[in-house]
Amino acid sequence: MFSEKNRNNIEKDLAKFIHWIITGQVASNYEQPYVLCDAYEAFIFSEITGSFYLDGSAMPFTPRGLMKVFHSALKDDTVVGLFEDGKPKYTPQILAAERPYIFAGHKKIYPIAASTNQELETKVKKLDHATKRGEALIMRIDTSKKGFGLESILEAAACFDFRRSGYVVESQVPIGHGIGSPDFLAIKQSTGHTGCHFIEFAMLRQAFQFKKPLPQAALKDQGVPLKAPILVGEAKTATSIMDAQVNKYKKSEMFDFAYEIHYSIERPRGAENGLLAIDKWALAEKVAPSQLHVDKIKQQSYIAWLERAKNIYLLANFSLEELSSLGNNLCGRKFTNSSKWLLELAEHPELQIEIEKRLAEIKNGPIER
């Protein structure tokens, strides 16, 4: 799909693929130049792929890169993202207050092919006149690059598909120096539970707004902790060689299964690796992965770190005033201008219980700034 010989059909084919990503349904006769979805799903798609909102501004907006907390796993080195110095910075509710169109109505995701920024700008201007502000999202297909620069669409495909299968998923996951950031991670919950993307832990207000099920791993009384198996994957479109990077993830001994993710290859290069590839406008498991060697102590430490990170994402549902009140209730002291305060709050054993007590406030209360 992402090869040079398919250049003339890439927009139509990618629209069919995005339709499957969003809906889980293959539509080989899909002819629309865009994919319609609600604003909640569009936000997640934009965060993974970098698709930008067509909002009439000189610098179109995407939340990609803004929903992060940590620079690497198992450490406390935070980055500016959801929080800065312990204060909410780019949380979904703050972004929604600054850009009301983000979580308004339905969105149209347009795949647009362009080899230069000027060509993209020309095509986008035509579309800008035909859509309402913030209604359209642009998924760029960079035809100047081998593979069209579409690794992120494979990340989105893996995340949305495993999310439908009950996993908690994430893309561009921080691991650590010398290992890198996997394009895809999925961790299991108890069988049969609704899956979610990691950023949905920070989107409880939006889940209420769009009548989505709350992420069950967010709720203490659901009894749905994160647990093994953990799946990891690397996506490529410019090359079919990715086993060297996957091997770095495997050597960490924290993951149960590993995938190579590509658009067309038939076999993975790594002997133990599984393969996810496009088949009839859907991402399919072409080869099942083998169980990897896991150091249980390392894996449990990583799961504990993910649980802690999850709690920080949950804290992103609150304004600074609400966080200060919550911290006073749990820790006996209000906000201090430091990430350490936030980390301490995230480790409190009663945090999720306290959050559940405040769910009614999250659902009905105004967003305080």
Image (tube, rainbow, N blue to C red):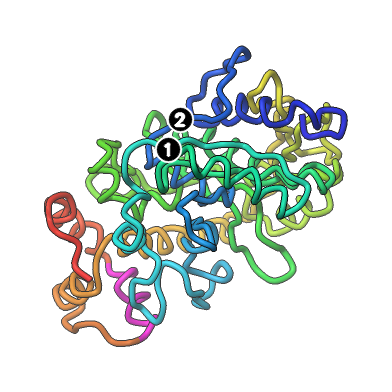
Q: Amino acid at mark 1?
A: Lys
Determine the residue located farthest toward the top in the rendered image: 29
Residue 152: give x, y in percent of width and height.
65, 46
Determine if the magenta segment contains residue 35.
no
Residue displayed at 76% across by 38% down: 273
Q: Are marks 2 and 1 in contact (CB under 8 Å)?
A: yes
- In the figure, residue 366 lies in which quadrant? bottom left
Left or right of residue 269: residue 310: left
Please give the range of residues in magenta: 338-348
Residue 283: give x, y in percent of width and height.
65, 28
Which of these two is toward me, 240 or 126? 126
Q: Residues within 10 Å of mark 2 (few under 14, many from 20)?
A: many
The answer to which of marks 2 and 1 sits earlier in the sequence is: 2
Q: Is residue 94 above or below residue 160?
A: below
Q: Identify the main secondary structure in magenta.
A: helix
Element on which disc 2 rests = strand
Residue displayed at 25% across by 64% down: 318
Residue 149: give x, y in percent of width and height.
74, 47
Residue 6: give x, y in percent of width and height.
81, 28
Q: Which mark is residue 107?
A: 1
Determine the residue located farthest toward the bottom in the rendered image: 337
